[in-house]
Image (cartoon, rainbow, N blue to C red):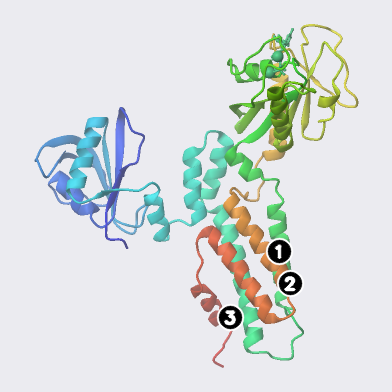
Amino acid sequence: MRDDTIFALASAPGRAGVQVIRISGPGSGPALSGLTGRSLPPPRLAQLAGLRDPATGELFDKALVLFFAAPASFTGEDVVELHLHGGRAVLSAATQALSGLGLRVAEPGEFSRRAFEHGKLDLTEAEAIADLVDAETAAQRRQALRQMEGVLGQLYDGWRHRLTRALAHLEADIDFPEEDLPGGLSDTVRPLVEGLAAELTVHLADQGRGERLRDGISIAILGAPNAGKSSLLNAIARRDVAIVSNQAGTTRDVIEVQLDLGGYPVVLADTAGLRDAADQIESEGIRRALDRAARADLKLLVFDGSRAPDAATLALIDDDALLVMNKLDMTDDLPALPGRAALRVSARTGDGLPALLSALEAAVAARYAPSSAPALTRARHRSALEECREDLCRALQAPLPELAAEDVRLAVRALGRITGRVDVEDLLDVIFRDFCIGK
Ligand SMILES: Nc1nc2c(ncn2[C@@H]2O[C@H](COP(=O)(O)OP(=O)(O)OP(=O)(O)O)[C@@H](O)[C@H]2O)c(=O)[nH]1
Ligand SMILES: [K+]
Ligand SMILES: [Mg+2]
């Protein structure tokens, strides 16, 4: 337990019906009594109280107060919540009073960090709280909530547990060989390691589904100059984001708009029209457009319906491309595209836009709808899992059990780093539970 007591505004600052200050640490209870001039209310029972600054005796608010006794609190420490009236003057008076009582303003994330240190959360759950607070769309919220409920942490901890068991067997093989073992892993341990390596491979091969859902799915709008890409971006975003003109080569920089597409977070990017440009700045714009095309999760390829399809855009057609034939209002006789159906729209009149949005939403959902298995959500997790899989592959090749054991040990650590549970204590526990070593 830490001995200092921290406090911070837990709600957004500004004028509001209520603002909540959270206090955590051993000084929480005394601080509350100091403000109310009364003994502590029973834990978890809201009480209305006048709050005074002990230094001046001045009443600064009448508020609802709550006390949570350790360890049954968010941080696992004594916690107090002050449900004050929302506003700057009340906040500054409360801050002054609490500072005067020797409490300190919390660092960012310090409450969650204390919760982790007291075993209230694993690291994936702590990260999920941040994701939930940041969630802007329904799909992001659902994913964060699942992770916050511990689904991901349980998966990783389950793997670590299985691996720890394999390691225990391996150590026993080394320390107490029953017979002359062939090199490397024994028949008991090898299938355990192989099985886990295979599960890791499946989990890692998810095309970044969970990470995309956190960070936003990238959709690039590409096409020839004047195809109407910027017009389409503006029509989809329903605001005047990008400059539209009849001059070919208007857009140079990549222009991004964030959208909630049927619950999925999307970053839609307008790009420079593709052509052989003499202008240096335009060429740089086209380089950026192609770079974005290569990194995008989905592409909207826009063709000018009043002309023949251009080769540069046709060359970008692949499984992640949706084809759009624009300027439907100009002609009834839109050109056909080789082998693929195109969505017919008019960015100018809005004709065909609802169908385009539905098609886009369906394409996003087909790729990023959450599956029943928990999704990998962060690069931090991915790199630890990749490291774990490499360690396991090395263990499977190792010529000596001692070397294999070292690799499995590294793999256990890599998994433990994800949830923050790296320690050797539980390895010893498993060894002594599974084997009668003293015998
Ligand atoms: N009639 C008609 N004109 C359109 C339509 N969409 C765009 N335009 C016109 O086509 C011209 C080019 O539109 P932009 O949106 O600037 O085209 P762009 O693809 O972004 O062009 P660059 O940025 O230069 O590559 C403008 O004059 C638009 O008004 C449409 O659906 N119908
Ligand atoms: K243009
Ligand atoms: Mg443009």
**Displayed quadrant of residue 14:** top left
Helix, strand or loop for disc 1: helix
x, y (%) of residue 10?
Answer: 34, 41
Q: Residue at x 73, y 74 (%)?
A: 190
Which residue is at the front of the view, 318 or 245?
245
| Residue 48 showing in the rendered view | no
Which amino acid type is marked by label 2? Leu
Q: What residue did someone put label 3 on?
A: 434
Please report whichever mark, 1 or 3, sits nearer to the chain's N-terminal start.
Answer: 1
Q: What residue did someone put label 2 on?
A: 396
Please report whichever mark, 2 or 3, sits nearer to the chain's N-terminal start.
Answer: 2
* Mark 2 Cα shell of 10 Å, populated few (<14), some (14-19), many (≥20): many
Helix, strand or loop for disc 2: helix
Please report whichever mark, 1 or 2, sits nearer to the chain's N-terminal start.
Answer: 1
In which quadrant of this rendering is ligand 3 seen?
A: top right
Q: Residue at x 62, y 50 (%)?
A: 376
x, y (%) of residue 433?
Answer: 54, 80
| Residue 61 showing in the rendered view | yes
